[in-house]
Amino acid sequence: MPPFSDVEYVYDPETLKMMGTAFDTACQSFPPDLKHHEAARRKLARLILRHMDRGERDAARLGDLALLDFMRPLSLKQR
């Protein structure tokens, strides 16, 4: 996975709330063994930041995109 050094923005309270909603919703989709896994939650948060920095502003879509990116390496391993 590429480094996350491109995350360099400051977010207003409304945007932080929206990103938190996206994060919470995406975490609910995690398999039970990942719901409280700190490294998995951190990776998901970084993916949300990445999509936010690229211009996504819809909470549902933000969470979906981050979750898809998170799960992509897992699906490739199962092939």
Image: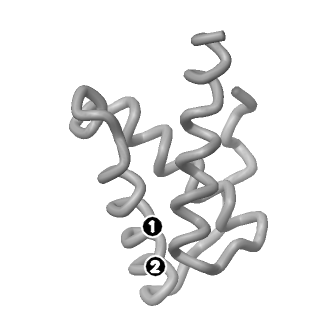
- The answer to whether 6 appears left or right of 24 in the picture is right
Local secondary structure at mark 2:
helix
The answer to which of 71 and 53 lies nearer the viewer is: 71
As shown in the figure, which amino acid type bears the numbered disc 2? Met
Instruction: Classify residue 58 by image quadrant.
Output: bottom right
Reading the image, the residue beneath label 1 is 22
Q: What residue type is labelled 1?
A: Ala
Residue where numbered disc 2 is placed? 18
At a point 59% along the width and 66% down the height, the residue shown is 62
Quarter of the figure with the N terminus: top right
Compared to residue 72, the image places residue 62 above or below, namely below
| Front residue (pair 42, 63) | 63
Residue 37: name its quadrant.
top left
Residue 5 or residue 31, whichever sits in front = 31
Image height of 35 relative to 55, above or below: above
Q: Badge 1: how crowded within 10 Å, few (<14), some, or many (20+)?
A: many
Mark 1 secondary-structure assignment: helix
Q: Above or below — where is 45 with respect to 77?
A: below
Locate residue 77, reporting x and y percent.
61, 11
Are the residues flagged by discs 1 and 2 in contact, CB closer than 8 Å?
Answer: yes
Distance from disc 1 to disc 2, alpha carbons, whole Å, reads 6 Å
